[in-house]
Image (tube, rainbow, N blue to C red):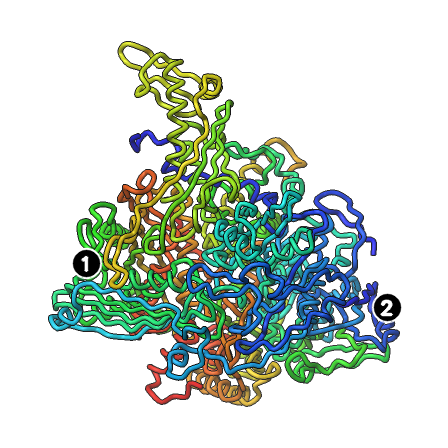
Amino acid sequence: MLLEFELNGRQTRVEAEPTQRTLDLLRDVLGLTGTKEGCGRGECGACTILLDGKPVNSCLLYAAKLQGRRVTTIEGLAAADSAADSASGRGAEGNPPALHPLQEAFLSEGAVQCGFCTPGMILSAKSLLDQNPDPDVREIEEALSGNLCRCTGYGKIVKAVQKAAAAAQAAAAQTAELGPGRRAASEKSGNGAAVRSTKAKSAGNAKSDRRQRGASR
Amino acid sequence: MSAENFRVIGRGVARVDGVELVTGRAKFAGDLRFPGMLYAAARRAGIPAGKIRGIDGSAALALPGVRAVLTAGDIPGPNIIGILPPFDQPLLAAGEVRYEGESLALVVAESREAAKRAAAAIRVDIDSWEPILDVDEALADGCRKIHPDGNITFSKRLVKGDVEKGFSEAEVVVENTYYTSFQEHAYLEPETVVAVPGGDGRVTVYASCQSPFHIRGHIAANLDLPASRVKVIQAYTGGSFGGKDDVAAEIGCLAAVAALRVQAAVMIVHDRGESIFGSNLRHAARIHYRTGSRKDGTILAREARIYLDGGAYASESPFVTMKALIHAGGPYHVPNVRVECTAVYTNKTYCGAFRGFGVPQVTFASESQIDELAAELNMDPLELRRKNALRAGEANATGQVFDRSVGLVQTIDRVAERRDQLPPAAAEGSSANGGRWLYGRGCACLLQGISNGAEGIDVAGASVQASQDGSVLVGVGLTDMGQGSRTVFAQIAAEVLGVTMDRVTVRQVDTDSVHDSGPTVASRSTTVGGMAVYKAAREVRSSLVKMASLMLKCDEERVLLQDNFAVLAPRADNPEARIPLQEVATAAYWTGFPLMNLAFSRAPDARFDHETHQGKIYIAYNFGTHLMDVRIDRLTGAVEVLRHLAAHDLGKAINPLGVEGQVEGGALMGFGMAHLERIEHEGGCIQNANFADYAVPSIKDRLPTETIIVEDPNPTGPYGAKGVGEPPVAGTAAAFANAVAAATGIRFTRLPIRREDLLAALQGRDRGPAEETG
Amino acid sequence: MTAVQYLRAENLAQALAQAAAAAGERMKFLAGGTDLCVQIAEGALDPTLLIDISAAEELRRIEHGAEGLRIGAALPIADLLEAARAAAAGKRTESAGIPRCLLQGAAAIGSPQIRQLGTIGGNVCNASPCGDTLAPLIVLAAGFTLSSARGSRVVPAEEFFLGPKATVLEPGEILESILIPASHLSGRSAFRMIGKRNGQAISQVNVAVWVKLEQSGGTVSGGGSAAGGAPGAAEGTPAAGNSIEDIRIAAGSVAPIPLRLGRAEERLRGSVPDEAALQAAAKAVQEEIRPISDVRTSRAYRRGVAASLFMDVMAEVLEREGG
């Protein structure tokens, strides 16, 4: 079938089998190898892409479902977010200027080791920050709970998301001063009180508060 | 160079290869594309033991898109891989099946799906045998021999002093048997290689790997080619942790055989299932241990009998056996130590290198013993450890004495200090919150040898090249698989040559370019690899300094290289003068000073008695102390780690940000080993070869690890550095077990201690004996 | 993959017509595909035709009417959760009153990525005993509307499941919508699960409960979050000593199907849920479930933890201390 969809900001037309995995369409047909296969079963999140801004496992997404949708892969991260071009500070130590604040934060916080989980992790984090610019630790954990990492132990990943959130907030405050039209439009989703964690343990909030207090670096 | 003047050493810098990773531009092996590339997939036995009667690939060959079906007879060379004697593992089995993942044939096809479909269509005729499933069965008289020489893979002893005498003098003895389970590496990137035949008679293999030179050697042997015709390039590697040490050689060989056969590039990518059951695991261990001390806590004797279930093939069992042997005694000055360690074959997925390499297993046993001893003596567990802790000038379990870089007591002190700063945990075993939670604190001390040690020669090669523009290209034979070694190498080169980090590039590992550097294992990349970079950089520096001294008209000793300048420090008789390094480099080239150096670093050889393992074995040890506070939900067995301190003496933290990453990541892996992860076998077949049922920690399971860096410089490492990649695994697992024991009052002798184990033990205790547990 | 034909249905009628026209095919309706894709990739399922219903708008509605709350089967889990969040923020009244146990169960499914594609109908029709919306739907007395070209029928949730991955669905029949009756939108409900780890965990056991407490005078209208009850629902903060007028308990991953625990319910129906009564009921839960040992955990753990989860859900619906 002929698929027409927006890919990383560009209208794309490609012929594909309807039941081809989007992961393979991206990697083998469209040459975008930034999205990775870790398990092929939707259990690790390495294949995460954004579909209309929300994270999905591309290994479980049949290509037919892309019709008329908006797809973002790691390659399109900076382009996907116009705020990335705004006045947020550029990375130190010689980073090229096209990095999204999340990418910069992952680098500066040491949240990248082997890098295989990183594209999926960053996209899940981007989706979170687009909807919830000021997430608490529990919300960050929930948003990234579908992305496994075996190298970092996750601590610096959480810090990187917090840093990117703070940087984006600072940039938004700056652009707010500059005038309308560049405000981040995402609706804050509140403190998530409506949906509690269903873990058997009863002290989810206390745990995340403890982490926030205990975080030393 | 004094520490206060370091420009980049000791700084937490961002990875030099980070940008390509966060943008998705980095090419992992599976991202590479070559014109006409084909895909290969193995047909695996699917049963754990048997005699192969026949393999018929004709149905597979007839399927659309299939180019070739290869079996053992298609391997030009000996069809053998293995790190060490007995070299007992075939690439493609022809005689016997020894484990469920045994590869019997390889299909080469136009797509991965076609290859897998065809692999399934291969007809195999196997007389299945009753699999041998545990160590006792394998060692029993009359048991079927899995290998011609019997079911013992390797067995060695460590003997220091006289344990019988030691125990006879001991006033208190504790004794117990401990068990650890098989653990899976679970790197996010499955094993992947691409073999590309060149038009020049060479074959290039891009591999997700940690030991490119091993791969080259195996490919050359199995293709019956000179090694100089084989080139291995390490692609960006999505984690390895020891798992891609030998498996990459296996599929590297298979892909190369296929590529030369069909004269096209061939890619092999494992799916997650075969990554788990078809490649090596961490050895499961049974450790019988006893420790004897005086009433004042002085440990007089330690004796351990270790059995390692190593699965179907030897892989790295001999080395794991030796390392377990050497570390079982713990980081203590014990005059009498006797350890016997035996690795055994069974018909299960073979075991090999996995971060820690035997040390996590024995540390769990050893540190459980120390806590049990502390309880008997009514001593504080950390103080008992401090009393017996190795100090500089004291002999360890192999009788090796280090007069420097034995920072164990410092790590104990730093942990105790930090612990005292923090609010107190609830009293152990207490039932705050209406009895729902049990609180406990545990600690552990450990040591981990750095460098290849008893495993053989430890050499690394590095190249440093300065261009006329003053930028620097570094090549090393050791691999970055996420642990950040590339960045450390760049820091060393930058520091020595006085350039800023952005002027340094560390190239991909390429076996053509540097001396055979062996495997990237044993936490050796910073220490041994770093030394090679340091040496090469010093040579290039020498040329730049000579040139600069001519340009600045001064003695060479007065030239400093820093911040991309050659600087003549100011003195009474002259103001500061500086020349951009770019000018110095250009002038050096045109004057004829060499600007590239290929260096070879060799760690001091191990020299020891192979019967008693007494002697000099490692060039240095990393020492650590961990402390963990947990609370356990007595109604569900769920565990929450409230606090985790991990202090390590690593000599010198060249990149503190990288060190934290290694400690945090290694800690979570140790936590997985101790609490969440267990490979489940049934009849020799793994039942949970997927990420749903093998519980790798998610972000919601992470630890609040706080890294405490202790630096007791190591004279054999660059800037005094020692490695830290592996030690946190052992420390975390052992501390967790002790914390759980403190919280519950129950000593768990089997890892992992899962939620269900906790609930069963707590309910069993609360209810009294004889309750149904089926 | 074998060559599987793919059809996209723009609406329910078209989907049913396509299904009827494909009587000879091995056909599966495709919504999010998060379970289906895996089973097809592993060869556990080998359909020749997939009818994609994810575009059928009428299968994604949430409608609050006199009969109760009707949820379209093809509603993605994430959309269900988002609707509840929007309702809590006062933005969408038709989404108000999604019972808490259903939201808790839905939030426990998989991961954010899975919840984005996966649908509530998919979770139901996949019929894995550990499905996290199944026990909640049973305790909410949900009715499943099953439709085909031949017509529609309604099957109560607790009669829908026949065994692991087996349901009463006939060939060509689709789960169209799920109705939670008005009678069960009032009351209080809760859900708990436990898995091997904290994140992205498959349920080793899950438990759901719905209770209707007897009203005594002067209770303050509670509600807390909108997830707890429809606006204006008569349920308030339980006063100590109120007896349980009605209760439904169900558990997943403790039997081949999600299990309604009628005998345990009898222990509490009509009685005051004091500590002794709850403990007795927890014991009854343990006795009524039929767990096995499998790769996920042991029978003993399932029995042990089921009681704990039961006490936790009861503590939540009764707003008691600890549990």
**Residue C221 visible here:** no
Of the pair A36 and B241, the residue shown nearer to us = B241
Q: Considering the numbered disc 1 on the image, is that residue within a helix, a strand or a loop?
A: loop
Of the pair C141 and B220, the residue shown nearer to us = B220
Where the C terminus of chain C falls, by quadrant? bottom left
Residue B222 lies, in percent from the top left, at 55, 57
Q: Tag on residue B333?
A: 1
Residue at 28%, 58% (x, y): give it. B445
Name of the residue lying farthest toward the top: B573
Determine the chain carrying the residue at label 1. Answer: B
Where the N terminus of chain C falls, by quadrant? bottom right
Of the pair B57 and B439, the residue shown nearer to us = B57
Can you tell which of label 2 and label 1 is closer to the viewer? 1
Determine the chain carrying the residue at label 2. Answer: C
Three-letter amino acid code at disc 2? Gln
Residue B114 lies, in percent from the top left, at 72, 63
Residue B198 lies, in percent from the top left, at 64, 45
Q: On screen, A94 above or below C75?
A: above
Residue at label 2? C14
Residue at 37%, 44% (x, y): give it. B528
Q: CA distance from mark 2 to mark 1?
A: 80 Å
